[in-house]
């Protein structure tokens, strides 16, 4: 395989003559980048440039201005390498057919397309389907278009890095990018209307109910059986006929007939006749 210098020397040795056409075509068929050293006559030849661009797309950079405005040569160049779109004329960079062929070959070549085609949803979608990073080359208005973005970012989370900041935090876009079904948030339940409070006190309400013959409801039902009422109930049970309370029983036992308390016996013995107290 010859070196780059050998290829350069070989193609530079040819004359600017039609008789060397076959040799020049043979060289650029294998080494399209060698077109830059070809004689001027061959760099203006559509057939030679077409062969060179088929081998190496960016070789269209070294073709004459007339060739860079040739749609047939341009299509060969961008199909080989989409970045060749950069070297085409402004007319071809705004050609829908050429730009679509370029983004199919190299999606990031969308950045070299004419601004009118960078706003085109069809062209941008073709590029994004092949590389989500190509969305950054789209026009700012298209990157703000919510309807287009819902289709473009579907299943492509990387696209969220390049959408416009105004819609970057849209929940529906995020769910679409993550491949999830979007469910809009439910509206909050209405708060219950509080009952109107009366300005009268509980005592006034109870008195009114008594006057009408009704029974006022206790404001605190859990206090109906309080500790105080329980103690009174126990006292009532012990005070029933034929039953005495434990405290009364203990006093009665201590002063029962035939039995004296220890303190009374001691006083009687100390005061007995013929015995003096110590």
Image (cartoon, rainbow, N blue to C red):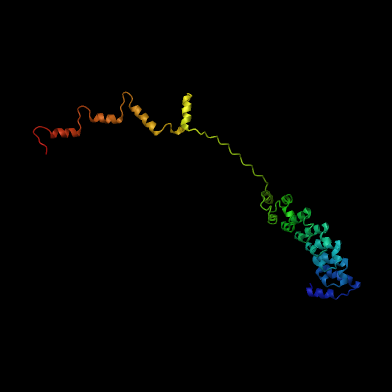
Image coords of residue 160 (percent x, y): 68, 54
In the rendered view, does 237 fall on the left or right side of 125?
A: left
Comparing 30 with 15, the one in front is 15
Rendered view: 16 above or below 87 = below
Give the x, y percent position of residue 87.
80, 65
Quadrant position of the N terminus in the picture: bottom right
Percent coordinates x, y for residue 177 in the rendering: 69, 51
Quarter of the view holding residue 192: top right
| Res 247 seen here | yes
Where is 52 relative to 9, above or below?
above
In the image as oriented, which residue stretches furthest toward the front?
199
Q: Is residue 122 left or right of residue 46?
A: left
Residue at 45% in and 33% down: 222
Quadrant containing the C terminus is: top left
Q: x%, y% of residue 67?
A: 86, 65
Residue at the spot 28% in from the left edge and 29% down from the top edge: 248
In which image quadrant can residue 38 be found? bottom right
Lateral position of residue 276 relative to residue 181, left or right: left
Residue 3 visible? The answer is no
Answer with left or right where residue 26 lies relative to residue 208.
right
Asked whether 151 or 278 is in front, the reply is 278
């Amino acid at each position: 395989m010859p070196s780059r210098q050998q290829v350069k020397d070989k193609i530079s040795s040819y004359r600017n003559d039609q008789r060397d056409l076959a040799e020049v075509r043979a060289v650029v068929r294998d080494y399209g980048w060698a077109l830059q050293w070809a004689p001027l006559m061959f760099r203006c030849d559509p057939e030679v440039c077409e062969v060179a661009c088929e081998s190496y797309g960016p070789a269209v950079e070294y073709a004459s201005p007339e060739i860079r405005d040739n749609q047939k040569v341009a299509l060969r160049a961008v199909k080989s390498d989409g970045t060749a779109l950069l070297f085409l004329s402004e007319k071809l960079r705004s050609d829908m057919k050429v730009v679509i062929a370029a983004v199919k070959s190299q999606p990031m070549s969308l950045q070299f397309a004419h601004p009118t085609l960078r706003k085109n949803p069809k062209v941008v979608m073709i590029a994004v389907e092949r590389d989500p990073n190509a969305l950054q080359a789209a026009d700012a208005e298209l990157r703000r278009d919510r309807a287009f973005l819902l289709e473009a970012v579907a299943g492509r989370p990387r696209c969220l890095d390049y959408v416009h900041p105004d819609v970057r935090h849209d929940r529906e876009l995020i769910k679409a990018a993550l491949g999830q079904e979007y469910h809009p948030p439910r509206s909050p339940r209405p708060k219950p209307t509080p009952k109107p409070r009366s300005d009268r006190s509980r005592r006034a309400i109870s008195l009114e109910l008594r006057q009408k013959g009704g029974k006022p409801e206790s404001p605190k039902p859990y206090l109906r059986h309080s500790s105080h009422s329980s103690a009174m109930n126990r006292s009532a049970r012990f005070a029933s006929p034929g039953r005495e309370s434990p405290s009364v029983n203990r006093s009665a036992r201590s002063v029962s007939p035939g039995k004296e308390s220890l303190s009374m016996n001691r006083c009687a013995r100390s005061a007995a006749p013929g015995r003096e107290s110590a």
